[in-house]
Image: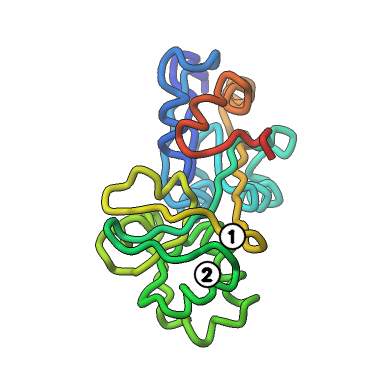
Amino acid sequence: MAVDANHPVLGLSSMATKAVLTALTAPGVLDAPSTRFESGGGVAIAQRIREGEVADIAVLASGAIDKLVAEGLLDAGTIRPVFCSEGVIAVPEGAVAPNISSVATVQEVFAAAEGIGYSTGPSGDALLALIDDWGLRDSIGARLVQAPPGVPVASLIAEHRVAIGVQQRSELADRAGVRIVGGMPPGAEMSTTFSGAVLTASPRPEDADRVLAALAGPTAYETIRRHHLQPATDL
């Protein structure tokens, strides 16, 4: 089947990078082939790739990218770290900001919170690992509220379904009804790296690789930072 070079390169991404990828792939922003991204929950996007969806690029948390490479679905030689995102704590707008200045105070906040929202993505995994390390799972487990796949923790916070929430800054910033208190304290920092790779079944692998190079290049840095993320080169 002939490939239509005028058809946009198709990317699949998690919701955490939807806004920045939409901005970066707007006409005239980057020197790269025309590109369109579809976004969803990271787990759902990975499953779509496993089920054989035709696309060119995946931009997901690095751990998810590595798994898809191991399954032969992404080209290992094309992996590029693109964005990194800080995990932060947020509360409903108007709520008193808790003291999150140290690991000890965050543990106290979690122990007292009526509900703690977290995601199905890497920030949720990191939060649960911290809670287990702190020995708090038994005491607060019933108050942990996982947002359904593709649903931002911000909605749980804004609707007062939880007292606090933890997720990437890019998913909580500028959300109505949500106030970001700050990042996790020293000793409990959470950061997620999002990488891109070309699907092994891509009809346009060379164009797809050019897009990834542009997304990871210096021309993209200002837009990335404006969307509450950091270029992966800042790591």
Secondary structure under tag 2 reads: helix
State the mark number for residue 106: 2
Q: Is residue 187 above or below residue 133?
A: above
Residue closest to the eye, 76 or 96: 96
The vertical placement of 59 against 226, above or below, is below
Please state the total of marks drawn on the protein image: 2
| Along the viewing direction, whichever of 19 and 163 lies nearer the viewer | 163
Whether residue 100 is situated above or below residue 14 in the rendered picture: below
Q: Residues within 10 Å of mark 2 (few under 14, many from 20)?
A: some
Residue 187 quadrant? bottom right
* Kind of residue at disc 2: Val
Percent x, y of residue 110? 47, 74
Q: Amino acid at mark 1?
A: Pro
Residue matched to label 1: 185
Q: Residue at x 44, y 52 (%)?
A: 41
The quadrant in which residue 208 appears is: top right
Tag 1 near tag 2, CB within 8 Å: yes
Residue 66 on image: x %, y %:
68, 49
User: In the drawing, does residue 104 fall left or right of residue 16?
Assistant: right
Taking the spot 62% from the left edge, 77% from the top edge, the residue there is 134
Q: Whole-percent x and y of residue 79?
A: 68, 36
- The mark that comes first in sequence, 1 or 2, is 2
Image-based side of 86 in relation to 62, left or right: left
Tell me the quarter of the image containing the C terminus.
Answer: top right
Identity of the residue drawn at 53% across and 46% down: 49
Return the residue found at the far right: 77
Classify 10 Å Cα crowding around label 1: few (below 14), some (14-19), many (20 and above): some
